Image: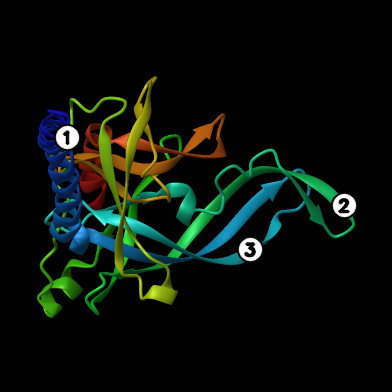
Amino acid sequence: MKFQNLYLFGLILIVFTAPATSVAQSLEERARETLENNKAALVVVTVQSSLEAKTTGDPLPARAQQRRTLGVTIGDDGLIVVSNSAIDASVGLEGQQAQLGEDVVSIQSANSVFQSVEISYGDTTLLSGKVVRQDEGADVAFIMPDQSEAETLGKKFEFVDLSKFAATAQAADQVIGLSRASGVYGYMPIMTVGRITGIFKSDRTYFVTEAGTAQGIPIFTMDGNPVGVTVVRIIDGKPSGVLGTLSAGSIQIMANLAREAAE
C-alpha cells in the first residue's frame, strides 16, 4: 500500500507541475516572437550639435557635442521617437554655474543647435534625419528621416504601431523591453523580460518596469502590444536620472504634432 501511495503521489506531482513548465516555455516563446517582430524598428541615432548658453556674464563659447542613443520607429513614414535628454545637452543647464575665465557665472539659458542626425537601422542602411519636435518636460524628441534618401535606397520602414497600445497594463504584469547591445556586440537586438513594478499617474502616465533598462527602448506586454518608451523623468526642468516608461498613448499624441511640424 505504501508503494501504491507513493506511486499515486508521484502522478499527482507530474500532473500539477507539468503545466507550470509549459507556461514558462510559452512566455519565452512570446518574448522571442516580440523581438523578431519588432527588431527592425529599433534604431541607433547619432546627433551632432552645438551647445550655446547665455550667462549672467558673457555667453559661453559654443561647444561641439556628439551624442548616440537608441530610438524606435513608430510610423510607416519613418518617424522616430527618442529620449530628448539623450540627444540634447542643454537640458537642465539653466540655473547651473559655469567657469568663464576667472569668473563663475550662472547659466540663464541654454540651447542645442542640431547640425546633423544619422540613423542606423541595423541592416547596413544609414539615413540622415532631422529633429522635428522636442518636448523637454516629457523628455521626448522626434526625428524624421530624409524621405528622398529613403526613396533612393528603397527603404521600407518597419515600425511599432503605438495605436495598439496596452490600455489594460497593470502592476505585476510581465513585460518585454527591446533594445540594442553596444557596439562591442554590433548593436545586435536584445531583450529584457521583467514586470511592471508600479504605475505613476500625473499629467502623464509612466510605468516603472524591470525591463526599462535604457533610454529610448520600447516596452511590450507579453501579447506584443506596446506599453510605452523609456525616458528620463524631468523634475522642475532638470533630469532626475530616473527612468520611466512613458505611455504609448501619450507618445502617439505628441507624434501627430511632430508630423504636423515636419510638413
Question: Disc 1 on helix, strand or loop?
Answer: helix
Q: Tell me the amino acid under the disc marked 3.
A: Ala
Residue 5, percent from left and from top: 14, 29
Nearest-to-viewer mark from 1 and 2: 1
Q: To which residue does mark 1 refer?
A: 13
**Of 19 and 237, which appears nearest the observer?**
19
Residue at point 19%, 75% (across, down): 149
Q: Tell me: 3 left or right of 141.
A: left
Residue at point 26%, 40% (across, down): 175
Q: Tell me the amino acid under the disc marked 2.
A: Asp
Q: Closer to the N terminus: mark 3 or mark 2?
A: 3
Q: Closer to the N terminus: mark 1 or mark 3?
A: 1
**Of 194 and 18, which appears nearest the observer?**
18
Question: Disc 2 on helix, strand or loop?
Answer: strand
Q: Which numbered tag is attached to residue 62?
A: 3
Measured Cα–Cα span from mark 3 to mark 2: 17 Å
**Of 172 and 258, which appears nearest the observer?**
172
Q: Tell me: 77 left or right of 61.
A: left
Q: To which residue does mark 2 refer?
A: 103
Q: For the N terminus, give its image quadrant.
A: top left
Residue at point 25%, 69% (across, down): 121
Residue 69, percent from left and from top: 42, 60
